[in-house]
Image (cartoon, rainbow, N blue to C red):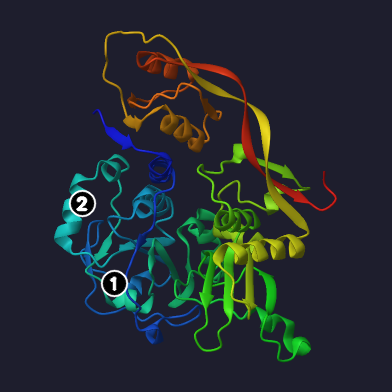
Amino acid sequence: MKRIIKIKHLVWGMVAHVLLFHMAMAQSQGTPDLSRALKIGDTFVPPAGTQVMRGEMEAIDWELLENKVIILDFFDTYCGTCIASMPHLQELQDKHSDKLQIFNVTWQDKKTLAKFFATNAFIKEHKVNLPVLYSDAALKSLFPYRAAPHIVMIYKGRVQAVTFNRLLTEENVLALYHAGTIDLPSKNDFGEALALSSSAGNAIGNIKAGAWITGYQNGVPTRSLTFERDTVNGLLKSTITNRSIYRSLVNTWAQIEPREYFVTNQRVEWKVKDSSVYKDFEQNGEGWDSKFAICYQRTDFVNRDNVSQAKVVLSDLHRFLGLKSYWKNKVMDCWIFRPCTPKSGEAKALENTMKFEGSNALARFIGITGRFPLVMDQAKIPEDILVGSFSGIEELNIQLQAYGIEVIQGEAEFEVFVVEEDGCQ
C-alpha cells in the first residue's frame, strides 16, 4: 500500500524519525493516591474481580502462579513502545511458560481492545496472544504510573521489581526465577530527586545555595534541565536528573544557543578517553543509566534569565566533570544535492512515500536517520518532493532527478559538537 507522510520542515522530520525508530511513550494524567502503592518486597495480594481476555485463560488462579515469575505489563493501545515490545514478551512467554506468566494490563475496556487486536496488523503478524487484564483500576492503584510501558515483576507472592520495559529480558527473568530476588533500577514516575546538598552532610552547615552533582538516583524520573523558582524562599533551582553527561551538555546548550538541526552521532566529535561513559550508544536504557547517568542541582539567590542561568549550569558541568564542550565547523564526507536538468520518466508507485516541503527538509531528514551521510543542500528546491524507500545514493538519485536534483558524493563543511576532556586534544 502506498503511504504518504508529509514532512513540512526539520521538526516534522525529527518527529517522523522518532515515531519510526523510538515511538513515544503514552502519558497518563493525574496524581493517584500514592499511599496505596506497593514497594519492592511488599506482599502482593491479588485484587478480586480481575477481568481477562485473549490468551488461553478464562479466569486467573493466582495461587497456581505462585511458583512462576509474574509480569504485569501495563500498556495503552496508543503507546507505540508498548505495542512494539509485545512480540518480545510473547517470545519470552512461549520459551519459558513453565517459569513465567506475562499479563498485559490496561485501564481500557474490552470493546476497545477487541477492535484493536482484531485490526492491528503488527500484532497479527507476530502472533501475539498474551492474556490481557482489561478495565483495570485495582492493579494500577497498587502500581501507579504516568508513562507506559510500566513493568512489575512478582515472585513468591512478593513484589520483586517495578521497572522499565527494556529490563524485561530473558536474563533478568531467569535470574529472578533462580535467585528468588533481583535488583533492578526502579521506575517511579512520581519520585523526587533527593536534595543533592544532603550528600555533603554536616560539612556545609546551613548553606542554602550552591551546586551539587551525583550519580544515578534510583526511582527518580529522567529530567532534562529545568528551572524552577521556589515561591517560599525565592531560590532559583536548576535541576537535571538521571541523564547522560552527553545529553545533559546538549540540553544545556539548547537553552543557550538552539540549533536548527538534530545533533546525530555524525555531528559529534569526541576528544575523550572513553566515549561510552558519556553516551548510551547501544541504547541499553536504564541499565546503562544506573552506571553512568548523572544528577545535577543548583540553587541560587541570584535572579537570572534562562539563557544566563544555562551558561552558569554549563560552567558547573564543565568544572565538575573535568571537560569542556563547544561547537566548531568541520569538513566532512557527505552527499550533496545540486541542481540539474529535470529528467522526465514514467512514474511508478513507491513504498513508504513521504512528502517533503523542499529539498532542504529532505536533506535534514536524511541526516536525522543516521543511516546515510549528512547532506549539503545546494539545490534549494522549494517545491514539494515525494520520496519513497531507498537503500543508497543511486536509488535516491533516480527519484530526485525528476525534480531537478542530482545527488553526488563530496565534501562540505558542517557544524559539529565537541566534547573534550581536560588533557585530551
Residue 15 vs residue 186, the one in the foreground:
15
Query: In terms of secondary structure, where does tag 1 sit?
Result: loop
Left/right of residue 9 with respect to residue 178 in the rendered view? left
Q: Which residue is labeled 1 in the image?
A: 61
Q: At x 61% / y 39%, what residue is drawn?
A: 267
Q: Is residue 68 visible?
A: no
Residue 312 screen position, x and y as percent = 67, 66
Q: Is residue 99 visible?
A: yes
**Near-viewer residue (47 or 194):** 194
Q: Left or right: where does residue 159 sit relative to residue 358? A: right
What separation in Å lies between label 2 and label 1 (alpha carbons)?
26 Å
Secondary structure, mark 2, is helix
Q: In which quarter of the image is the C terminus?
A: top right
Q: Is residue 333 above or below residue 151?
A: above
Crowdedness near tag 1: few (<14), some (14–19) or many (≥20) residues, C-alpha within 10 Å: few
Of labels 2 and 1, the one closer to you:
2
Q: Which residue is drawn at 26% across and 75% down?
A: 137
Q: In this view, does 31 lie above or below 75?
A: below
Q: In this view, does 192 lie above or below 83?
A: below
Which of the marked residues, 2 or 1, is nearer the chain's N terminus? 1
The amino acid at mark 1 is Asp
In the displayed structure, does residue 249 sit left or right of residue 350?
right
Q: Which mark is residue 116?
A: 2
Q: Residue at x 47, y 62 (%)?
A: 164
Q: Which residue lies furthest to the right in this view?
A: 423
Mark identifier at residue 96: none
User: Residue 248 in the image: x percent, y percent?
Assistant: 61, 58
Residue type of the residue flagged with mark 2: Phe
Give the crowd class for mark 2: few <14, some 14-19, many >=20 residues within 10 Å.
some
